[in-house]
Image: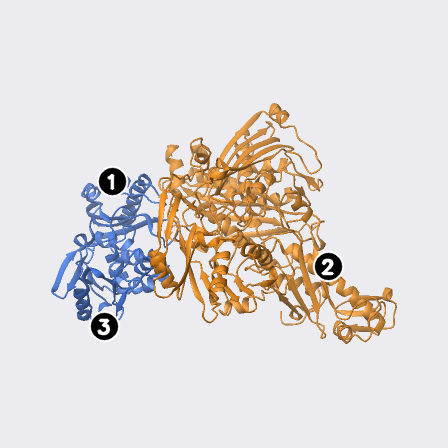
Chain colours: A blue, B orange
């Protein structure tokens, strides 16, 4: 389990990194926390000719909040997990990040790396989909803004980033005062990739649901669940509405199978977890989250 | 424990003397062994489950800068392979070759080896070897392997049946049961069909070897983690065609072995041969993927049982068929674990009428061989599930049906129809103690109340026996097991009166060094700090053909006691001369040699006598100078550890997930040497048992024959967060078969775990009529059962 030969550079600025990406193009791979890339290299499943190690780029690591949240792509998951700015405005992120691997993995792993790796069983892509996030991608030629959906939607272990582009920032809008959230995941052991999971954000108008966002993971790709969301709008919060949403969620979930669970089982789980996440979300609306 | 202490070292939780080193990171493991100029070996492994090898082109690999050599099967002319030490009558020969000769039979089987300046270069070279594989049909399911048209894995065998062995139900006294009579008398015949999952020890430290051939001295120094270095040395000499006297095996610290490192492996030959041919030290460290593919697997069986029961709950007769999924080759112990399953299946119960057919079946998978438990947990799964099924069918409480059928405390020695002789114990008391610990009656009430609230709580009971302390060599001979079961110990008292103990046992984490030092200190009646334990060097330690196993300290401990008895007798003889007393009037006590009745006045310390022994000035006639003894202890008989576990679990029927509520262990391993280490062994064994019950599984893809669980992302080891708190209670019934009364205990913790979990989950879902008959009980598998039952 030793990687094939590659060349390596460690830029100290974004501009330098973008120059290297422009130079090496599809031959290059960006190394952030390395929690997925390094095993892939060692298994020789990834054989990039060139590694651009961005760990020395301090300007990529920050958390800033003014209601909405801005996260530098190189921000370590532990920093996100421990941030008061994150937990006060977006406690769903704090909870979701606690499910990512183990502490030692989160100490190295980065929020941008997790998103850009886009493992369909990972928490980050589905979470950021449910939160209507957007990202900045930069290249030597300029920068652009993409929605999380545009970045990872319907994609399996890849994103819409160009070979010369670097993910630099993730932005998460503020949650409405009348919103609540739920996060439910089932994994074989704590810290494992999910068998299935659902991130839910709902906005309430009295006892009725005025909007709902559901991000599901553990399938073929991270996905929003628009049919289930639509069924919830205008519904009274309660078992009946959750069950109906769960049924739709299960039906539209892009399920998959592996050694840990069949397509049918995962589809079933998404239904169950959607119901549970909605029950959780509607029970903690109005800021009493956590 | 800083104050000196001369007596009473048995039964004391002496701190592990191994830990100061290990906790500070000062242990020396195989990867730390790096002789100057060492080359690195990497193994090319078959990517196919079954493929003919029509050619291997190594030219590109050999021309890569930094590559020193490539070994293929064609280079093994004159080199042998390791035999199977357990060769039961009728067992076909299909031992594991060093390199796949002409055909690969499982994914991960060694095909070639590269030796290079670094592991990186060696792996680059593996990429350059071109193997002309002709992919053949494969079979990974044991029943499919028995089909008429199944691909034959070892052509010379004609089919995939390696052996069919019958336990005819005759006990060691030659008394046969009446199975037909039992089934004729039965009110009910309970049937069960169990799939026990394939898993293994998966040591944190993978295997590794450093071989160093000295061409001038014609000696091979092999650094190895083998649990049985002496036997490896014997077999390696034969395979390499060099004298055994040329080989010295050194053992560093071992980061877990669990039986997996008892076996001899192809790499032992390849790494040694590479060093001999290249004249350089050669190092190989197994990586994790290799470890999962190419270190032996364990457990996997398909069992079918029929249990004849009377309506009052009496268990009358048991008959079964065990298909042992052996993988592609027989490894070091052949079908040994499955044989043990057949021998142990009647467990603690007075089932006089028994028959079991055990089939060893070849499949295109990694060999299934030595793993902690060694067939015992498989046996316990079968019988303990069957007893629960009988209880449910008859409407008898599962605790009660066990109690009423258990062998009584006054019925030892008990001659089981599996052929084993159980030495001692009190099975009903262990059960009662476990039930008391969980507050069984209250628990049943609570279970009913929770069921009303929609919480599905289940209670699972599992009793077990563990025939340990293998074993009397003559009996091993009768079982066609071609190595001895004895254990030797040399004890040397130095001129200052301190003891050095030499053992062939190899500590692999269980605290053997501490345990044996305690036994020596106790019997010499000196402080434990004055006992040194030497292990891990075949040039210094006594020969053992059985070597280290979790349940062997009891045998090694007796060898220590016996050697010390000889030393004490000699010290008394020498001391009597010095004290000018008749040896009859002199006794050894409190680390001194004294005239009886005049201990205050006429007494010598062990050091004083030892000094005289080495000066040799006044040695009694017939004695030699010096003060040392070697004793090779061949156990008189097996010992039988036993106990009962109870688990309490909650099951989420919507997801199939299990939550632990409680787990209680009651065990009896005879006299306990060190309670702290015993608890540690139970924790570890139980973690392994529960790992196999809910998480760990080597899954093979039926379509491709690939091992799907070939990383630790897919092969799931339990960590402490995945396990319940263990509540442990002991009984201590000394074994009448061993000096000291010790029984082997290092494996027993895993014995009933699978059955206990399956029984608990089945109990939790009793209203759905679900029977959990397959391990591991994964959420997906359990939900599948729940879904099929309409739950």
In the rendered view, does B366 fall on the left or right side of B316?
left
Q: Nearer the viewer, residue A46 or A226?
A: A46
Dot 3 lies on which element? loop
* Camera sees residue B653: yes
**Same subunit, tags 1 and 2:** no
Question: From what the image shows, is residue B264 above or below residue A81?
Answer: above
Q: Which mark is residue A12?
A: 3
Label 2: few (<14), some or many (≥20) within 10 Å?
Answer: many
Depth check, mark 1 against mark 2: the one in front is 2
Task: Provide the residue designation for mark 1.
Answer: A241
Dot 2 lies on which element? helix
**Residue B10, image x and y in percent?**
67, 60
**Residue A171, image x and y in percent?**
19, 60
Q: In which chain is the residue bearing label 3?
A: A
Hey, which residue is sitting farthest top in the picture? B184
Residues at marks 1 and 2 touching, judged by CB atoms closer than 8 Å: no
**Residue B169, image x and y in percent?**
64, 33
Q: Nearer the viewer, residue A178 or A164?
A: A164
Q: Which mark is residue B562?
A: 2
Dot 1 lies on which element? helix
Q: Nearer the viewer, residue B734 or B484?
A: B484
The mark nearer the N terminus, 3 or 1, is 3
Q: In which chain is the residue bearing label 1?
A: A
Alpha-carbon distance for marks 1 and 2? 76 Å
* Camera sees residue A67: no
Label 3: few (<14), some or many (≥20) within 10 Å?
Answer: some
Quarter of the image where the C terminus of chain B is located: top left
In the rendered view, does B598 fall on the left or right side of A170?
right
């Amino acid at each position: 389990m030793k990687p094939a030969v590659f060349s390596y550079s460690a830029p100290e600025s974004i501009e330098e990194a973008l120059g290297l990406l422009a130079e090496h193009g599809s031959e290059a791979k960006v190394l952030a926390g390395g929690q997925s890339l390094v095993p892939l290299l060692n298994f020789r499943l990834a054989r990039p000719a060139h590694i651009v190690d961005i760990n020395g780029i301090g300007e990529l690591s920050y958390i800033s909040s003014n209601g909405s949240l801005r996260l530098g792509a190189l921000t370590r998951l532990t920093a996100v997990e421990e941030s008061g700015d994150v937990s006060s405005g977006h406690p769903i992120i704090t909870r979701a990040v606690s499910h990512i691997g183990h502490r030692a993995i989160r100490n190295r792993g980065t929020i941008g790396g997790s998103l850009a790796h886009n493992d369909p069983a990972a928490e980050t892509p589905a979470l950021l989909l449910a939160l209507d996030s957007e990202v900045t991608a930069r290249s030597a030629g300029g920068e652009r803004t993409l929605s999380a959906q545009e970045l990872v939607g319907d994609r399996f272990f890849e994103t819409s980033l160009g070979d010369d582009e670097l993910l630099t920032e993730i932005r998460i809008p503020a949650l409405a005062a009348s919103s609540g959230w739920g996060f439910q995941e089932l994994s074989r052991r704590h810290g494992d990739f999910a068998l299935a999971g659902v991130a839910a954000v709902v906005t309430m108008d009295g006892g009725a649901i005025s909007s709902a966002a559901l991000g599901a993971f553990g399938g073929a790709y991270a996905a929003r669940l628009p049919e289930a969301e639509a069924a919830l709008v205008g519904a009274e919060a309660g078992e009946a509405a959750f069950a109906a949403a769960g049924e739709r969620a299960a039906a539209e979930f892009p399920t998959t199978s592996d050694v840990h669970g069949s397509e049918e089982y995962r589809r079933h789980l998404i239904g169950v977890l959607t119901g549970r996440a909605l029950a959780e979300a509607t029970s903690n609306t109005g800021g009493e989250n956590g | 424990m800083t104050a000196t202490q001369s007596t009473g070292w048995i039964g004391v939780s002496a701190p592990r003397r191994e830990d100061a080193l290990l906790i500070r990171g000062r242990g020396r493991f195989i990867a730390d062994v790096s002789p100057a100029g060492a080359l690195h070996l990497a193994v090319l492994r078959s990517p196919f489950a079954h493929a003919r090898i029509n050619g291997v082109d190594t030219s590109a690999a050999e021309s890569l800068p930094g590559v020193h050599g490539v070994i293929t099967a064609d280079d093994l002319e004159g080199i042998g392979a390791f035999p199977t030490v357990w060769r039961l009558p009728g067992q076909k020969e299909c031992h594991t070759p060093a390199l796949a000769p002409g055909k690969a039979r499982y994914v991960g089987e060694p095909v070639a080896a590269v030796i290079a300046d670094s592991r990186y270069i060696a792996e680059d070279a593996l990429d350059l070897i071109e193997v002309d594989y002709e992919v053949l049909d494969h079979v990974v399911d044991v029943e499919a392997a028995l089909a008429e048209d199944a691909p034959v894995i070892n052509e010379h065998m004609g089919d995939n049946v390696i052996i069919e062995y019958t336990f005819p139900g005759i006990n060691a006294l030659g008394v046969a049961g009446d199975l037909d009579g039992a089934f004729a008398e039965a009110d009910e015949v309970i049937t069960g069909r169990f799939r026990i999952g394939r898993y293994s020890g998966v040591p944190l430290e993978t295997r590794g070897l450093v071989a160093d051939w000295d061409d001038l001295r014609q000696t091979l120094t092999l650094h190895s983690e083998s649990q049985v270095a002496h036997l490896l040395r014997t077999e390696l000499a034969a395979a390499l065609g060099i004298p055994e006297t040329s080989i010295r095996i050194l053992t560093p610290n071992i980061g877990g072995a669990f039986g997996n490192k008892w076996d001899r492996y192809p790499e032992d030959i390849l790494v040694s041969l590479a060093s001999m041919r290249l004249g350089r030290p050669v190092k190989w460290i197994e990586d994790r993927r290799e470890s999962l593919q190419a270190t032996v697997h364990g457990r996997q069986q398909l069992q079918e049982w029929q249990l004849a029961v009377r309506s009052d709950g009496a268990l009358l007769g048991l008959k079964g068929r065990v298909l042992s999924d052996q993988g592609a080759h027989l490894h070091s112990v052949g079908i040994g674990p499955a044989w043990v399953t057949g021998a142990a299946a009647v467990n603690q119960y007075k089932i006089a009428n028994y028959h079991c057919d055990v089939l060893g079946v070849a499949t295109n998978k990694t060999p299934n061989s030595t793993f902690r438990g060694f067939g015992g947990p498989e046996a316990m799964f079968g019988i303990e599930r069957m007893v629960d099924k009988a209880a449910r069918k008859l409407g008898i409480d599962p605790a009660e049906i066990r109690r009423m059928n258990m062998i009584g405390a006054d019925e030892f020695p008990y001659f089981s129809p599996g052929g084993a002789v159980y030495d001692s114990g009190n099975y009903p008391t262990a059960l009662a103690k476990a039930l008391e610990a969980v507050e069984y009656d209250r628990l049943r009430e609570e279970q009913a109340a929770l069921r009303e609230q929609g919480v599905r709580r289940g209670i699972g009971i599992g009793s077990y026996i563990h025939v340990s302390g293998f074993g009397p060599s003559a009996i091993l001979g009768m079982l066609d097991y071609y190595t001895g079961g004895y254990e030797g110990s040399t004890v040397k008292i130095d001129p200052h009166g301190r003891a050095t103990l030499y053992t062939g046992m190899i500590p692999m984490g269980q605290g053997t060094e501490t345990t044996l030092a305690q036994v020596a200190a106790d019997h010499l009646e000196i402080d434990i700090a004055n006992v040194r334990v030497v292990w891990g060097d075949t040039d210094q330690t006594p020969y053992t053909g059985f070597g280290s196993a979790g349940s062997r300290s009891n045998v090694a401990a007796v060898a220590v006691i016996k050697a010390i008895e000889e030393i004490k007798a000699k010290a008394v003889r020498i001391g009597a001369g010095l004290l000018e007393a008749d040896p009859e009037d002199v006794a050894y006590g409190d680390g001194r040699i004294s005239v009886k009745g005049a201990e205050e006045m006429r007494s010598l310390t062990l050091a004083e006598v030892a000094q005289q022994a080495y000066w040799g000035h006044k040695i009694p006639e017939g004695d030699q100078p010096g003060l040392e003894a070697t004793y090779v202890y061949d156990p008189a008989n097996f010992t039988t550890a036993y106990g009962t576990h109870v688990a309490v679990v909650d099951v989420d029927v919507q997801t199939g997930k299990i939550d632990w509520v409680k787990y209680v262990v009651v065990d009896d391993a005879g006299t306990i040497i060190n309670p702290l280490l015993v608890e540690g062994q139970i924790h570890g064994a139980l973690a392994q048992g529960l790992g196999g019950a809910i998480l760990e599984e080597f899954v093979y893809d039926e379509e491709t024959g690939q091992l799907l669980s070939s990383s630790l992302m897919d092969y799931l080891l339990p960590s402490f967060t995945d396990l319940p708190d263990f509540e442990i209670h002991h009984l201590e019934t000394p074994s009448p078969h061993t000096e000291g009364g010790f029984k082997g205990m290092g494996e027993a913790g895993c014995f009933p775990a699978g059955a206990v979990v399956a029984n608990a989950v089945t109990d939790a879902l009793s209203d759905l009529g679900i029977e959990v008959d397959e391990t591991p009980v994964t959420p997906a598998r359990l939900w599948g059962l729940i879904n099929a039952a309409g739950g």
